[in-house]
Amino acid sequence: MDDEVRFRDLSVTLSGVAGENVEVPSANPVNFHQAVNDPKGCEPVVVDGKLFLPPSDRPLPLVMVVPGSLGVGDGHLAHTGALLSEGYGVFVLDPFGPRSVTSTVANQTQYSFAASAFDVLAALVVLSDHPGIDPERICAQGHSRGGSAVLTAAMRRFADPIVGEGVGLAGVYAVYPWCGHQFADPTVGATRMRAIVGEQDDWVSVQQVQAQVQAIQVGGGDASIRIVAGAAHSFDRLEALYEIPEASVTPGAPTVYVDDDGSMIDPGTGQADPGITDRDMFLAAIDAGFGRWGAHIGSVGDQPDVFRADMLAFHTEVLGPPG
């Protein structure tokens, strides 16, 4: 795909289904605290994406696909095609184009992680009102930064103030998610969650992903994890493993926990501060020596097939058959 062209401006047909542009009123909270305490006061933004709905005489279950730091790519569209072939509806969210962002690989602070999760909830509201979609059967599948977004969107401490207690995703499939920010109360309600991550991932901390899943389980949530042996970041891609030298990563940095009111808790002091932002914590991690340049993406052998089978199994288990 051409990075200079907005995703909305492309004509995309997958598995015989043409994508339809859908706009989503969302917001740009400066941090989790603002999103939780003043969701209507956050800077507004309209994001968009493409909705793919196979022909059906009844509302369909749907998977929302949320991209990572490189934006919507061919891999996300390949997964969309696979889901469409199974009869599911798919919405591919583009959080970058509407914000005039092309990549967050070198700088993850161009907009907040709270904004990423806000987009997911805003899209859930819009999609739930669509007559062709079953609002009780919507899953969100996020990759990398998108994986962090769908996980946060499932946290009731984050979601309830934004969309209300009765609104939630049926399932969350977090694909090699960055879990450096975690709500201290990881209650996810009825949302079923699964994470999948490569054993050799050098973008994110596999241990932080494990800890997030374990916390959800301890909190009574339905959560599971699969660690794929020998796999790196983006092992679902149909391309050989290679390094992105401009990637700015801090996989060894301490976890930043988020208090019930959305305030980040400084790992160094243990104090919650509503004014702390993503940038503050990333700079602190770099100052402490955890930052480095360069990380790898790509697959080896049958890893993309392993991913696709796991992806389809999760969505089928949560959403049931499309009919």
Image (cartoon, grey):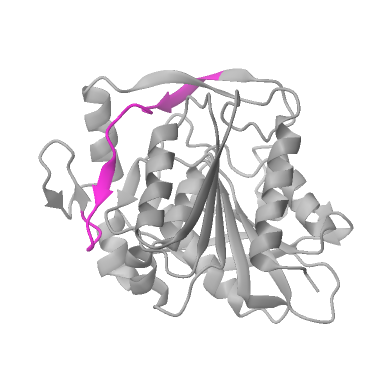
Q: Which residues are magenta?
A: 244-263
Q: Nearer the viewer, residue 37 or 268?
A: 268
Instruction: Quadrant for residue 34, please give it.
Output: bottom left
Please tell me whether residue 28 is drawn above or below residue 214 in the rendered image: below
Whether residue 101 appears in magenta in the rendering, the answer is no
Work out which quarter of the rendered image holds the C terminus and state it: bottom right
Instruction: Examine the image and state in which quarter residue 75 appears.
Output: top right
Q: Is residue 126 left or right of residue 290?
A: right
Specify the farthest residue to the right. Answer: 16
Task: Please give the name of the residue rendered at 76% of the width and 44% of the height, measured from the top-left corner.
Answer: 78
In front here: 89 or 38? Answer: 89
**What residue lies at 69% left-to-right and 63% top-to-bottom?**
21
Task: Determine whether, in the image, residue 65 is placed left or right of residue 164.
Answer: right
Residue 42 rendering spot, x and y as whole percentages:
33, 65
Which is nearer the eye, 23 or 239?
A: 239
Residue drawn at x 65%, y 37% as measured from the top left:
3
Task: Report if residue 96 is visible in the image.
Answer: no
- Residue 262 among magenta residues: yes
Q: Position of residue 16 (x, y in %)?
A: 89, 58
Position above or below: 176 against 139: above
Quarter assignment of residue 151:
bottom left
Rendered location of residue 32, percent (x, y): 30, 56
- Image quadrant holding the N terminus, namely top right
